[in-house]
Amino acid sequence: MSKKHKKSLVLLTRADLVARGITYSPTYLRELWTKGKFPKPQKLSDRKLVWPVDQIDAWVAARLKENRAS
């Protein structure tokens, strides 16, 4: 009998976004996710927002594809 491995959830903080080259200000990020143009963060606590890495990776890939098409 094989065990199913649960995929671990990787979360990114704002500092992680900056390390990945997403250097938008917190205010601009909020504007983008409010308009549906950036993944909406999850509230981990009253003062901590995080983003699932798969959503950020998909957003980056879409931006790259969009830029190649133009």
Image (cartoon, rainbow, N blue to C red):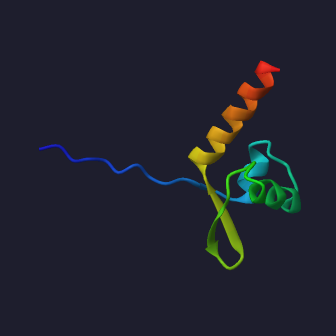
Q: Percent position (x, y) of residue 62? A: 69, 33
Identify whether 38 is placed above or below 46.
above
Quarter containing the C terminus:
top right
* Lateral position of residue 57 relative to residue 70, left or right: left
Name the image quarter holding residue 13: bottom right
* Lateral position of residue 4 relative to residue 66, left or right: left
Q: Percent position (x, y) of residue 47? A: 72, 76
- The outermost residue toward the top is 69
Identify whether 64 is placed above or below 8.
above
Identify whether 43 is placed above or below 11.
below
Please report the residue visible at 75 percent of the width from the left and 56 percent of the height from the top: 33
Identify whether 46 is placed above or below 65.
below
- Report the label total: 0
Depth check, front residue: 8 or 37: 37
Please report the residue visible at 73 percent of the width from the left and 50 percent of the height from the top: 38
Quarter containing the N terminus:
top left
- The outermost residue toward the left is 1
Name the image quarter holding residue 34: bottom right
Q: Percent position (x, y) of residue 45? A: 63, 76
Please report the residue visible at 74 percent of the width from the left and 43 percent of the height from the top: 20
Please report the residue visible at 63 percent of the width from the left and 70 percent of the height from the top: 43
- The outermost residue toward the bottom is 46
* Lateral position of residue 67 relative to residue 12, left or right: right
Depth check, front residue: 70 or 60: 70
Q: Percent position (x, y) of residue 41? A: 66, 61
- The outermost residue toward the front is 35
